[in-house]
Amino acid sequence: MLARYTGARLNELSQLYVCDIIQVDNLWLVDINDSQPKQRLKNLNSRRKVPLYPVLIKLGFIDFIKTLKTPRVFPELKHERDGYVTSAST
């Protein structure tokens, strides 16, 4: 659902850190970047901030983020040769 409502690539989402979910002026955003270890972007233009669609907030995504005790949003995904996407898509 996160991919559907943000339009972000699966690898971009699977490598998110909690600090990549930000609030600016009452608007929740996903900060797609390569600032953390093992994060990478497809190209320079891939760096962007994507608004979270209200349905994701209503479904509890922000509440989920606030409960995380790990730095990564999806810590169960392991980094492999092609990034985190291999674990996410299998």
Image: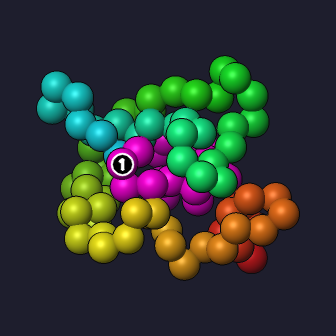
Expressed as whole percent of the image width and height from the top left, the position of residue 54 reads 27, 43
Q: Residue at x 66, y 21 (%)?
A: 45
Q: Residue at x 68, y 43 (%)?
A: 40
Q: Image height check: is 59 above or below 19?
A: below
Q: Image height check: is 74 above or below 57?
A: below
Snapshot quadrant of residue 89: bottom right
Q: Is residue 17 magenta?
A: yes
Residue of label 1: 19
Q: Is residue 55 left or right of residue 90?
A: left
Mark 1 crowd level (few <14, some 14–19, many ≥20, 10 Å Cα): few
Q: Classify mark 1: helix, strand or loop.
A: helix
Q: Residue at x 60, y 52 (%)?
A: 37
Q: Is residue 58 magenta?
A: no
Expressed as whole percent of the image width and height from the top left, the position of residue 32 reads 52, 37
Expressed as whole percent of the image width and height from the top left, the position of residue 13 reads 56, 52
**What secondary structure prevails in the magenta region?**
helix
Q: Image height check: is 8 above or below 75?
A: above
Please, which residue is most extreme toward the top here? 45
Colour option used:
rainbow
Please, which residue is most extreme toward the right here? 81
- Give the residues drawn in magenta, as a range: 1-20
State whether residue 53 appears in this view: no
Expressed as whole percent of the image width and height from the top left, the position of residue 21 reads 35, 46
Please, which residue is most extreme toward the front here? 37
> Callout 1, which amino acid?
Cys
Give whichever of 71, 29 is nearer the camera.
71
Give whichever of 9, 73 is nearer the camera.
73
Q: Residue at x 69, y 38 (%)?
A: 41
